[in-house]
């Protein structure tokens, strides 16, 4: 076998940690590439206010999905028996269906609900919450099941199908309809339809076989009791985490216009979403391996390695946006979106630290420390909420971004510190990657920052992309991430 095919086969091996992550990141990279190619088109087809309505709709779903099945889905990985895991899936579907019924009833009073929320423009689209929530739950359960079976290529495929349909639907709506925010919302829902259909095609036969040979409702009560810590502690923590992540989307309309919300949304999408997709890929593989590592007494080493890699991937783009956010946003999105780049300068470090922390929160599930997770989530909610309200009352949108950026970063640093201690990772080992990769990033960023005022926007963007490629080439080489080691097989 020649060297190149051997190297490719090695990188995408089903064994170990690196191969599954590479498989998932391949789908993520294609999805991100498609999404970012569409962004300059979408920001010219839709206004900041229309993006604000769409972001509010997605925020509502993010909060609803956190408690719709009482977090029982996170127990799918834990049973040794597939039958017990399948019963947890059925339990989650039944609970989500109940939530969808309640949402359908609430949507009959959409204008009153929208007035209560303080966002009248969301009223025409509230009826879509229930079906979209059900579709999102099917997608998540499908993702967890293929992760349990370590068939990670299906997660990558579903993510790509979702993004292709969502992006094409949104662009088509902007070009050929006058739905406004409805085009963005409808595109999001269409993506969930595609993702759910993909998992139905992949898992349909297995589901039929299980239903044909088992009584699916038998044992549901036993599984609900066995994993009761998830609804008691993990669900409130998940709900608080979802609220904390989307708290600006919830509260900004109370103090500022939907345009400000749309600008914040593009700042969020530019960094938090791509880092979040990478974090989700890592989280899926980490969850599976962390269960085994905990049983074998090597959880600390696995956690340290995953944490190092997350910092390595996220620190450069975060620092690049801290230094060059306004210029890059104006070039990519258009002059009307430059203010979102100013917001990003204050928010980037928070988004980066949140992306590092998110995959590691699986430690709370593996160690069954959901009560501690709930406490941490409550602290984050109080601190970030106070910063938002204080900044909002002052009426300065840049000031509120600075306050929530500082508050969000502070609570995420605390969060990471607690999780590293739980896993048995020393403070020194936890701090080392921030120093190492931060110092490695600055020589690539500072030169362009110093000369940015004499360069046209296109040159800044091209040089930034080139320097980003150089940074990642260096870290790949220094860490020998593409090397074939005997232990890898």
Image (spheres, helix red, strand yellow):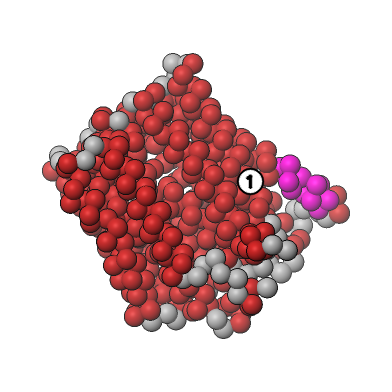
Residue 461 drawn in magenta: no
Q: Quadrant of the image for the C terminus?
A: bottom right
Q: Is residue 399 above or below residue 417?
A: above
To which quarter of the image does residue 49 belong? Answer: top left
Taking depth in this image into account, of 390 and 274 the one nearest to the observer is 274
Q: Secondary structure at mark 1?
A: helix
Taking depth in this image into account, of 193 and 81 the one nearest to the observer is 193
- Whether residue 68 is visible, yes or no, is no
Residue 206 drawn in magenta: yes
Q: Quadrant of the image for the N terminus?
A: bottom right
Q: Position of residue 382 (x, y in %)?
A: 29, 57
Q: Position of residue 147 (x, y in %)?
A: 64, 58
Q: Is residue 279 above or below residue 172?
A: below
Q: Residue at x 18, y 48 (%)?
A: 451
Q: Position of residue 100 (x, y in %)?
A: 57, 38
Q: Is residue 262 above or below residue 286?
A: above
Is 259 left, or right, of 142 in this rendering? left
- Whether residue 256 is visible, yes or no, is yes
Q: Residue at x 33, y 26 (%)?
A: 47
**Residue furthest left in the image:** 394
Q: Which residue in the protein does label 1 denote?
A: 157
Taking depth in this image into account, of 453 and 69 the one nearest to the observer is 453
Q: Dot 1, how many residues are within 10 Å of its Cα: few (below 14), some (14-19), or many (20+)?
A: many
Tally of marks? 1
Q: Which residues are magenta?
A: 200-210
Q: Residue at x 68, y 41 (%)?
A: 198
To which quarter of the image does residue 287 belong? Answer: bottom right
């Amino acid at each position: 076998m020649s060297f190149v095919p051997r190297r490719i086969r090695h990188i995408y091996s089903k064994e170990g940690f690196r191969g599954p992550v590479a498989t998932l990141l391949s789908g993520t990279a294609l999805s991100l590439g498609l999404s970012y190619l569409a962004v300059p088109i979408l920001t010219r087809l839709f206004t900041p206010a229309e993006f604000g309505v769409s972001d509010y709709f997605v925020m509502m779903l993010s909060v609803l999905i956190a408690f719709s099945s009482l977090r029982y889905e996170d127990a799918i990985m834990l049973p040794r028996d597939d039958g017990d895991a399948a019963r947890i899936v059925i339990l989650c579907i039944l609970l989500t269906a109940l939530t969808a019924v309640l949402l359908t009833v609430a949507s009959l009073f959409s204008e009153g609900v929208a007035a209560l929320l303080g966002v009248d423009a969301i009223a025409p689209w509230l009826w879509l919450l229930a079906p979209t929530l059900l579709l999102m739950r099917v997608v998540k359960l499908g993702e967890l099941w293929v992760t349990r079976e370590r068939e990670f290529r299906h997660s990558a495929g579903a993510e790509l199908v979702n993004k292709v349909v969502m992006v094409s639907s949104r662009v088509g709506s902007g070009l050929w309809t006058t739905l406004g925010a409805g085009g963005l919302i409808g595109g999001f829902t269409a993506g969930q339809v595609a993702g759910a259909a993909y998992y139905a095609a992949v898992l349909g036969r297995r589901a039929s076989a299980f239903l044909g040979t088992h009584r699916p409702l038998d044992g549901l009560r036993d599984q609900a009791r066995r994993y009761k810590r998830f609804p008691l502690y993990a669900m409130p923590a998940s709900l608080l985490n979802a609220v904390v992540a989307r708290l600006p989307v919830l509260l900004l309309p109370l103090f500022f216009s939907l345009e400000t919300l749309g600008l914040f949304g593009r700042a969020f999408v530019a960094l938090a979403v791509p880092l979040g997709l990478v974090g989700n890929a890592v989280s899926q593989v980490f969850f599976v391996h962390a269960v085994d590592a905990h049983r074998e007494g090597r959880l600390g080493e696995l956690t340290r390695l995953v944490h190092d890699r997350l910092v390595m991937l996220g620190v450069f783009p975060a620092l690049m946006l801290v230094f060059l956010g306004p210029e890059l946003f104006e070039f990519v999105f258009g002059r009307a979106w430059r203010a979102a780049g100013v917001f990003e300068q204050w928010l980037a470090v928070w988004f980066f630290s949140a992306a590092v922390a998110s995959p590691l929160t699986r430690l709370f599930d593996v160690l069954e420390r959901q009560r501690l997770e709930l406490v941490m989530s409550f602290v984050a909610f109080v601190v970030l909420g106070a910063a938002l309200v204080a900044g909002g009352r002052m009426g300065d949108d840049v000031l509120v971004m600075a306050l929530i950026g500082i508050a969000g970063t502070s609570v995420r640093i605390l969060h990471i510190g607690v999780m590293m201690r739980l896993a048995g990772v020393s403070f020194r080992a936890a701090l080392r990657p921030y120093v190492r990769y931060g110092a490695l990033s600055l020589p690539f960023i500072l030169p362009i920052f110093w000369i940015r005022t004499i360069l046209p926007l296109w040159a800044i963007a091209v040089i930034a992309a080139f320097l980003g490629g150089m940074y990642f080439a260096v870290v790949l080489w220094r860490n020998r991430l593409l090397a074939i080691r005997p232990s890898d097989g």
